[in-house]
Image (cartoon, grey):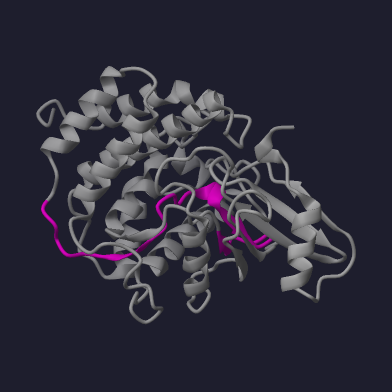
Amino acid sequence: MTAVDRLNLDSLSAYLRQHLPDLTGEITAEKFSGGQSNPTFLISAGARKLVLRRKPPGKLLKSAHAVDREFRVISALSQTDVPVAKPVLLCEDDDVIGSMFFIMSYEDGDIFWDPALPEVTKPVRSEMYSAMTRTLAALHSVDVAEVGMQDFGKPGNYYQRQFSLWEKQYRAAETDTNDHVEQLIQWLGSNLPEDDGQTSLIHGDYRLDNLIFYRGQPKVRAVLDWELSTLGHPIADFAYYCMSMRLPHGAVVGGLRGVDLDARGIPSEQQIIDEYCAIRGLSGVGNWDFAISLSFFRLASIAQGVYARALAGNASNKNAMKLGAHVDPVAKLALDGLSAAEL
């Protein structure tokens, strides 16, 4: 068992009993198989279940694994119609279990990993994708000042800042030179859109397996994994969600490329765009090629970071080492989506 799989239960139990005096019974912890970035555990105390999400131990990249930001954003969104787990407790004292952590409610429901959704029927697939799109549109429609989140990110120039951030993150975790990544970095740097003033709360990693659905229902119960949330451009966030339409089906980071969408009742990328724009009252999405390409670069950078942590022994998911092999294909998919004229 590695350091990321362990919790000091004696220290944790004492802390929880002090701050949550209504807990009864023996406190146990079981690590969830997901949560590559921030290790996540099911905490049981008698009949009550909670979820603990912590920073991983070891040397970390600056600004990464910000569980305190996750706690803040779910606290803010719990006041809105955006479905999130209920915030319970934030512990910033590293001495308790070795790193910062927070406690949130356990939301029982269905989690799906394959975006082709083989577990459900064709009509339900259509409803689930609509529910995902509506939930993301609801997030982007939240009045950030009304929920006290106007200082949750820097205003303006989101695309420029994100490109710079993910290039730095990629360079910090780089293990060798990748020609496709270098070509993608060059294209992004040469095609940065001008700031159009759009700003909203964004999730940053919005995809199927970061959602919990009510059991047996095509309705989102909770959006998980808010580590990358910030104030930013809503279309960039939306593009990251739509990126799954272009990722190959069946890969470690899988999507819907190669799947017969119509036969399965899954909307096309354009149909998802149309529904999102209708909900938000938009005439269309601007700079779509850039937004999608930036999304691929972010994914490549995240995969490279997870791979680098795996090499250092600090990754929290058994698939972490495999992600290193996906950096090049992800970058190539971004380039394949651009026309020869653009390149």
Q: Is residue 9 left or right of residue 191?
A: right
Q: Compared with residue 119, is residue 132 higher up or lower down, i.e. above or below?
A: below
**Residue at image coords 11%, 36%:** 190
Which stretch appears magenta? 194-223
Q: Position of residue 99 (x, y in %)?
A: 60, 50
**Residue at image coords 81%, 71%:** 23
Which image quarter is the C terminus in?
top left
**Residue at image coords 50%, 79%:** 79
**Most foreground residue, 237 or 269:** 237
Q: Position of residue 292 (x, y in %)?
A: 28, 42
Residue 91 is drawn in which quadrant?
A: bottom right
Q: Compared with residue 278, is residue 8 higher up or lower down, i.e. above or below?
A: above
**Most foreground residue, 56 or 304:** 56
Q: Compared with residue 10, is residue 252 higher up or lower down, i.e. above or below?
A: above
Q: For residue 271, say whether it is visible.
A: yes
**Most foreground residue, 233 or 289:** 233
Q: Position of residue 279 (x, y in %)?
A: 34, 68
How many numbered circles are shown? 0
Is 207 inside the magenta-drawn segment?
A: yes
Q: Is residue 335 left or right of residue 93?
A: left
